[in-house]
Image (spheres, rainbow, N blue to C red):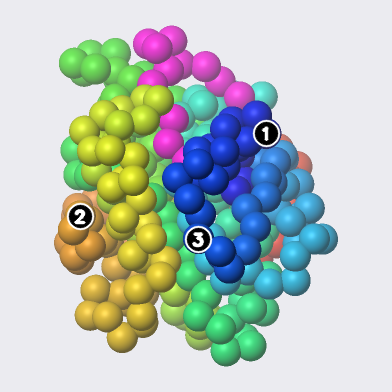
């Protein structure tokens, strides 16, 4: 369980134990991951690879939903919504990709599951090719923090689709999916109970590959069915624009991430 706060992890694991974790399911351990800074995201992935020799399933479910109306910037001048929901997971995943590829090469079923949002469909006309666009504040929308969240989740969808193309062209055996869990009763949003919020991610990560809803690049929504993403999310030019600026931003910051192409 990769999160920045060890105490929060302990609380979650205590709840799991109280609810009765079944025997034989192994051990859940805390792995430190702070997504605000792409440097710490990279370092976290490198530390993971020092400890583990295989990785079968990676679920990226970061979701900063509210900045209380005053968007904060990380050390690279990127709004935290974009830093935590998109840029950090991008760097973390890209750094882990060689380990995922090696695991898949041994014949294992290896998957990456990115948690997106139905809200990505509301982002239709914006661009992703500059820091100014990443930091757009949406002050003239009804709920600016929610609009910023939706923008960051559109970035997740664009990234997922771009990475799916890259994996396909390289002949990779890693399966990549993006899911929408619904609005979940948690510390930040509410509609469905927490356990239901995990259903789609668990299905994406564990359902057999011969399930008709499990295939490379699929977008899954409750109740575990395929749905088409928005036209913007499927726009290859938008995907390339986001990827290109991401590579530039990381390069300008002196952050070397293996496997990125300018």
| Label 2 vs 1, first from the N-terminus | 1
Q: Is residue 41 left or right of residue 186?
A: right
Residue reaching furthest to the right: 50
Say which element carries label 3: loop
What is the count of numbered marks? 3
Please, is residue 76 above or below residue 129 in the view? above
Q: Which residue is mark 3?
A: 22
Q: Which residue is mark 2?
A: 222
Q: Which residue is painted at 76% across and 46% down in the image?
A: 43
Q: Which mark is in front, 2 or 1?
A: 1
Distance from Cα at disc 2 to Cα at disc 3: 26 Å
| Label 2 vs 3, first from the N-terminus | 3
Q: Which residue is painted at 67% across and 79% down in the image?
A: 102
Please, is residue 50 above or below residue 84 in the view? below
The magenta stretch is: 62-74
Distance from Cα at disc 3 to Cα at disc 1: 23 Å
Residue reaching furthest to the bottom: 107
Please, is residue 175 above or below residue 246 in the view? below
Is 64 included in the stretch rendered in magenta? yes
Please tell me how crowded label 2 is: few (under 14), some (14-19), or many (20+) other residues with Cα within 10 Å.
Answer: some
Which numbered circle lies on residue 6? 1
Please, is residue 154 above or below residue 164 in the view? above
Q: Is residue 237 left or right of residue 230?
A: right
Is 192 included in the stretch rendered in magenta? no
| Residue 205 in picture, x, y percent from top left | 42, 66
């Amino acid at each position: 369980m990769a999160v920045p706060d060890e105490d929060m992890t302990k609380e979650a694991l205590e709840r799991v134990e109280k609810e009765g974790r079944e025997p034989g399911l192994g051990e859940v351990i805390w792995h430190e991951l702070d997504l605000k800074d792409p440097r710490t995201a990279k370092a976290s992935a490198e530390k993971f690879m020092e400890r583990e020799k295989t990785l079968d399933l990676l679920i990226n479910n970061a979701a900063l939903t509210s900045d209380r109306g005053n968007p904060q910037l990380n050390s690279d001048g990127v709004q935290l919504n974009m830093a935590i929901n998109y840029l950090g997971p991008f760097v973390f995943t890209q750094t882990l990709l060689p380990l995922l590829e090696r695991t898949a090469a041994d014949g294992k079923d290896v998957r990456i599951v990115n948690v997106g949002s139905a809200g990505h469909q509301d982002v239709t006309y914006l661009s992703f090719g500059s820091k100014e666009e990443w930091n757009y504040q949406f002050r003239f929308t009804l709920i600016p923090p929610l609009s910023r969240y939706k923008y960051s989740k559109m970035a997740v969808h664009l990234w997922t689709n771009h990475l799916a193309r890259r994996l396909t062209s390289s002949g990779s055996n890693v399966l990549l999916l993006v899911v929408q869990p619904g609005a979940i009763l948690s510390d930040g949003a509410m509609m469905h109970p927490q356990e239901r919020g995990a259903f789609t991610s668990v299905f994406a990560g564990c359902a057999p590959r011969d399930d008709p809803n499990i295939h490379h690049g699929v977008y899954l929504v409750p109740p575990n069915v395929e749905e088409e993403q928005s036209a913007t999310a499927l726009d290859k030019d938008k995907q390339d624009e986001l990827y290109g600026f991401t590579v530039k931003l990381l390069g300008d910051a002196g952050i070397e991430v293996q496997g990125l192409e300018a």
